[in-house]
Image (cartoon, rainbow, N blue to C red):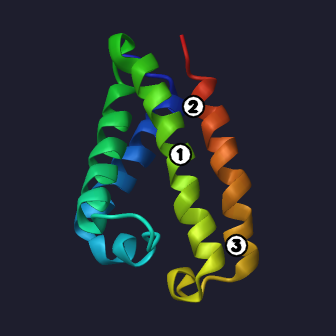
Amino acid sequence: MDQEPQLLFMASLYIFAGLMHFIKPKIYLRIMPAYLPWHKELVFLSGVAEVLGGLGLFWVATKNLAVYGIIAMLGLFLLVHFYMLSSQKAASGIPRWVLLCRVPLQFVLMYWAYLQLV
């Protein structure tokens, strides 16, 4: 088990974020792009993916797979970020500048995950 503080922090963030999909699913349902099917199922699946990605970071044997999964997941989440920029309902009153900042943040998070590769 890799005990680097930043890796533990990253794993904790993804596990927490994933669990929030089950604790507060309405938040995630509201921001699901209208053009995607099966909103409840996708919210559930994305929560599972985040939790598994976070857990996968804890072990050397699964860390690289988890990193690639996290990068792919963050890429897919760009759909939600762009949808929030295009829909006032999905934006939920979040200032546009915050929504705009979230897009490059996804790429920063992808790069951070990439740096964790063995």
Left or right for 90, reference 38: right
State the residue position of label 2: 113
Q: Which amino acid type is shown beneath numbered disc 2?
A: Ala
Mark 2 or 3, nearer chain start? 3
Observer-nearest of 43 and 39 = 39
Q: Label 2 near label 1: C-beta < 8 Å?
A: yes
Circle 1 SS class? helix
Amino acid type, mark 3: Val
Cα–Cα span, label 3 and label 1:
17 Å
Q: Quadrant of residue 103?
A: bottom right
**Could you give the CA–CA distance between mark 1 and mark 2, rounded to whole angstroms?**
10 Å
Amino acid type, mark 1: Leu
Q: Position of residue 35 (x, y in %)?
A: 45, 69
Q: Which mark is residue 98?
A: 3
- The residue that label 1 is drawn on is 74
* Residue drawn at (28%, 71%) of the image: 25
Q: Hey, which quadrant is residue 52 in on the image? A: top left
